[in-house]
Amino acid sequence: MSESEAAAPAERRAAISPLQAIAAGLVAAGAALGLSEILSGLSRKIPSLVVSVAEEIVDITPGFIARWSIDTLGSAQKPALVWGIVIVSILLGAVLGWPSRKRWWVMPAGLVVFAVVGGWAAARNPLSSDGLGWMSGLVSGAFGIAVFLSLYALALAAVPSGESEEPAEERRVPMVGRGRFNDRRRFVGAVGIMAGASLAGGLLGRWLRRRDTVEGAREGVAEALQGRTIATPTARPTPVPTAPAGDDDAMVDSSPGSTPEATPAAGADPTAEPTAEATGEPTPSVTAEPVREPNFDHIAGIAPLITPNEDFYLIDTALSYPQVDPADWSLQIHGMVDREVEISFDELLDLGLVREQVTLSCVSNSVGGRLVGNAEWVGVPLARVLDEAGVQPGATQIVGRSIDRWTAGFPTEVALDGRVAMVAVQMNGEPLPISHGFPARLVVAGLYGYVSATKWLSDIELTTWEAFDGYWIPRGWSKEGPIKTQSRIDVPRRGSVIDPGPTAIAGVAWAPSRAIEKVEVQVDEEPWVEAELSRETTINSWRQWMVTWNATPGRHQVRVRATDGTNTTQTPEITDPAPDGATGWHTIQVRAEEA
């Protein structure tokens, strides 16, 4: 026998088909994932391996990719990442299954890597136990290996002796139960059963995690808040358009197509564009009326004055919301302070509560976007919390840290300049929803969330402005994040078809900490017309606005701009959200035609 003939059997170890090897790899990967999900559902201390790996990916993702995902997917970016990891993991099982038909150890080696990476990511989760995280990864990986080798053995035993590429006595597969089955249909049945069990395991794990929440603790917080006094600041008077002395009817004619009197409102900008009357131009098709109602919630399609919790935008890096029981929660205050303190939840409430309406916005919100909302918050003034520790001179930055390691930093003076800045515990009359930071979060009027709105707050550090950068700063966003004055058209919708005649143009405008003084609307090239505003609740809340438009048949362009309490009007210059917030006038196209 030649040397090449003697070596041939050693090169032909496999006897199962490529399809069988791929199927075994797919099912083994799915089985490992399914068991890991079941384990994560058994205890809050055992995190999901998929979610843990996803969180590590989020942490190393470059800023431009993060911005793209938020702009493209919005709040769907996190589910997309998690499902992407699941799909990629299972497909990797198929990819590793293919070479395993000749080298049975390839797929088990891949599952060892799965176990190590998953265990490492789970152990890094701040809400998990290091030992339990590693245990979850290793046990899940070992289970996947056992499933693969068992299916490999079934496939190998089902091969008729005449089809094998190597003598039966030379098949080197360390299997338990090899030779018990010799029917390929049993391999197919085993694959189907294990695939179904893996899917069921994943769903069971998700169900168990959803059951194991702190919703019961939220009910306890609601009861604790019921008996407490909550201070409500008095809103400043709302500016109202003035009429000539002795002429009660000269303020505005509300009939469609009529022309408002050219009487400047109190505090009007003397450099503003002249009205139609002053220039002799045709009468505008847009009119407004004086304030008669506290809000315009009755207008179909307009954003309500108070955004319901379930509709409030969600943008954060948390792939699995931390489940924090207030009984176990505390707030650490340290750094450049006179004394480091640790405040329990009950001690926090004892510092005194206030109620404030504050509009929050995501810096990724594009012009006319929906990543903004207005809510009524109850919490403890941040300045009062800081007084417990004593802020040292030279401490120019407040860093908020979340239980899940997320960070945000803003100037210390913001918490002390009189604006609304609080450790919030309630949102719209109920304890903070888990997704919005239960049991406590930061709310700071006038700053984008990426520099201030720390959810699941656990730590406040006083430091210098130069000493620390929050989570998003190294990823390309500006270190300072004041919310820009913005306005949005909610009604009619972009591209909609409306009936000719009187119709409402309405929306919201916001400039938290500065107030909205004026909103103007322009249709086509007609003069700008000042809109009617809802009554001001606080300078930190958005205001609804509306005008009546006598729409004529054809295509029209509608735009809006707002002026804030510092007499600053939105710039028409259009810029992207990065690095410090979008600018520009929200502009839409609509068509009026007979039905």
Image (tube, grey):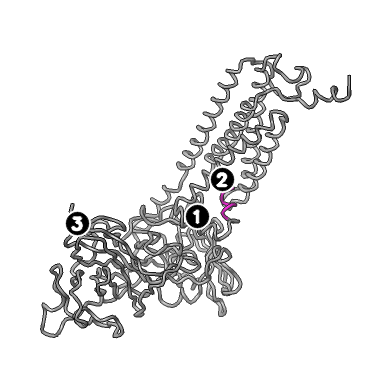
Is residue 81 visible to us here?
A: yes
The amino acid beneath tag 1 is Ser
Q: Which part of the image, by quadrant, shows the N terminus?
A: top right
The amino acid beneath tag 3 is Asp
CB atoms at circles 2 and 1 under 8 Å apart? no
The residue labelled by disc 3 is 499
Q: Secondary structure at mark 3?
A: loop
The residue labelled by disc 2 is 47
Q: Where is residue 284 drawn, in percent x and y?
A: 20, 72
In depth, the one of 531 and 180 nearer the eye is 531
Residue shown at 85% from the left, 22% from the top: 6
Q: Is residue 501 left or right of residue 455?
A: left
Q: Is residue 577 left or right of residue 11?
A: left
Q: CA distance from mark 2 to mark 3?
A: 55 Å
Give the label on residue 69, or none: 1
Quadrant of the rendered image containing residue 446: bottom left
